[in-house]
């Protein structure tokens, strides 16, 4: 029988979301909040989002126009390694060394968090980031289901999991020797595809090691895992996860499309200078390469210089958004009208990728960026830098064939000649045409995934709500 006949019997759904304190993790979870609030579930859905005071403005802006409730819990003070006033990882001076103490410190928020939870209307289920491992304990104590969200895709999660379970690279000496992944033998990984020293033996007291153990232990006790992906993008990996792993996967993406549906009518008051620049390029019939490396990347001075010189040598039009080090005035003078650099400013990346002139994306392969590129039908030049990005690159280059990948020289830096060549291939060559054709096909399928009533992710969300909120009826 159709559910709407039982509208009166449907319980009110109240979802608590707690995104990790970094932009790359907050953005998709806030999009999930919008998705939940826009879902045409016959009952009532309310969403409460937890964050900290300094992250509140970003959260509030991202959720503007929705009826989401935002609750902030104070971030712990006087954490030895963390400079005061920092509550988001993209503000950390050295993310690679401060990530663990910063994330570990969030546990001090637990008692305030639980107090706030107890004052809320009955919670149907909670979704929080795997980095906030301790929230699982809070959900258990207060008696509601906990679903984990990692911000990653299913392929990288599965490959990482397989590499660990099989201790695949522990005994491999070479950084660059390709080794087949047991569950996916056609995929080969190398030690350099993983965080440095990940496989080195560590004492159980090592803070990084302890953090991974805590995270894995809490994940194993969760009631499911949400992926920002859709069924047709990674069918092999989602199927594997369903069959071979205990955690039930829920593909609810592409979450970046949710904002689009809702913001369609909102007119921008003032057009940022880079959008005007893109308009000019479009009017002149020029194709533009968009270059960006997410919110976390720590790029060495040497690598930055190689990227600059590679872009200069490629002769293509480019818009480069970056953080940190200056490039030197001479660079901008030399490239002139052909290139625009935007330093230390927040841009609307999704809008840039949607712009008619943008025909290629040089990306660090953060999963949000890749999803946004696929949804905007823009082919990618994969330039993975850290975290799970090399595994994401394997997915987009080898499995989906929507990207080409730069090759790193033996000194660990991608050289200017390589960058210039691959940029030209992407923007002007046959390779670019082939990748564009493929990404256009995936872009079309991506759009369908969230279509009301028929899209795979729409249906998955509907099933999730029913599984957790209506006793399976
Ligand atoms: O000026 C900016 C800068 C960034 N973004 C957005 O910020 C997000 C960045 O996310 P992502 O591309 O995934 O990069 P990171 O910030 O590096 O993301 C972290 O989180 C991701 C999701 O877990 C991981 O895949 C990455 O490896 C990890 O570094 C994207 O939505 C961008 O559109 C903007 O809109 N404007």
Image: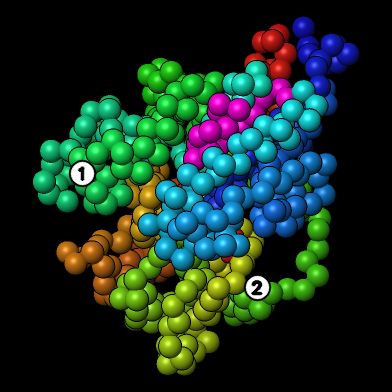
Tell me the residue that label 1 is attached to: 200
Residue 329 percent location from the top left of the image: 46, 91
Residue 133 percent location from the top left of the image: 50, 34
Asked if residue 309 is positioned above or below residue 444 in the image, the reply reads below
Here the colouring is rainbow
Q: Which of 206 and 304 is in front in this view?
A: 206
The answer to whether residue 382 shows anywhere in this view is no
The picture quadrant where one finds residue 240 is top left
Residue 282 percent location from the top left of the image: 61, 74
Stretch of the chain drawn in magenta:
123-138
The picture quadrant where one finds residue 3 is top right
Residue drawn where x is 78% and y is 30% of the image? 119
Residue 337 percent location from the top left of the image: 53, 87
Q: For numbered disc 2, what is the local secondary structure?
A: helix
Asked if residue 221 is positioned above or below residue 233 in the image, the reply reads above
Q: How far apart are marks 2 and 1 (CA)?
A: 46 Å
Tell me the residue that label 2 is attached to: 275
Q: Nearer the viewer, residue 71 or 320?
A: 71
């Amino acid at each position: 029988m159709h559910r709407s006949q039982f509208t009166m019997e449907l319980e009110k759904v109240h979802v608590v979301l707690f995104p990790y304190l970094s932009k790359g993790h907050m953005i998709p979870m806030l999009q999930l909040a919008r998705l939940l609030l826009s879902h045409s579930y016959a009952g009532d859905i309310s969403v409460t989002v937890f964050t900290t005071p300094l992250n509140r403005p970003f959260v509030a802006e991202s959720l503007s126009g929705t009826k989401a409730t935002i609750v902030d819990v104070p971030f712990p003070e006087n954490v030895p390694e963390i400079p005061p006033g920092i509550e988001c990882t993209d503000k950390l001076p050295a993310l690679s060394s401060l990530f663990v103490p910063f994330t570990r410190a969030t546990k001090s928020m637990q008692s305030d968090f639980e107090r706030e939870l107890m004052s809320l209307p009955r919670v149907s289920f909670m979704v929080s980031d795997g980095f906030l491992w301790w929230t699982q304990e809070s959900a258990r104590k207060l008696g509601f289901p906990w679903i984990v969200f990692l911000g990653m895709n299913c392929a990288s999660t599965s490959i990482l999991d397989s590499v660990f379970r099989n201790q695949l690279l522990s005994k491999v000496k070479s950084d660059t020797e390709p080794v087949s992944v047991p569950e996916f033998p056609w995929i080969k990984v190398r030690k350099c595809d993983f965080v440095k020293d990940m496989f080195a033996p560590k004492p159980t007291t090592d803070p990084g090691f302890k953090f991974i153990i805590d995270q894995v232990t809490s994940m194993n006790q969760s009631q499911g895992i949400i992926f920002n992906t859709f069924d047709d993008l990674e069918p092999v990996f989602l199927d594997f996860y369903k069959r071979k792993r205990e955690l039930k996967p829920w593909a609810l993406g592409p979450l970046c499309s949710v904002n689009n549906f809702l913001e369609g009518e909102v007119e921008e008051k003032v057009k940022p200078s880079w959008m005007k620049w893109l308009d000019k390029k479009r009017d002149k019939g020029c194709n533009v390469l968009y270059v960006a490396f997410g919110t976390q990347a720590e790029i060495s001075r040497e690598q930055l210089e190689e990227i600059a010189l590679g872009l200069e040598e490629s002769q293509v039009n480019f818009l480069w958004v970056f953080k940190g080090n200056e490039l030197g005035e001479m660079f901008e003078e030399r490239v002139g009208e052909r290139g625009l650099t935007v330093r230390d400013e927040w841009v609307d990346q999704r809008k840039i990728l949607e712009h008619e002139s943008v025909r290629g994306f040089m990306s660090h392969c953060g999963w949000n960026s890749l999803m946004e590129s696929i949804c905007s039908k823009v082919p990618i030049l994969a330039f993975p830098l850290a975290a799970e990005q090399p595994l994401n690159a394997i997915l987009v280059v080898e499995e989906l064939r929507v990207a080409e990948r730069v090759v790193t020289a033996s000194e660990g830096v991608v050289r200017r000649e390589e960058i210039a060549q691959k940029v030209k291939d992407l923007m002007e060559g046959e390779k670019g045409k082939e990748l564009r054709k493929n990404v256009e096909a995936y872009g079309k399928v991506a759009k369908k995934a969230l279509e009301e009533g028929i899209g795979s992710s729409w249906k998955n969300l509907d099933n999730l709500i029913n599984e957790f909120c209506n006793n399976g009826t």
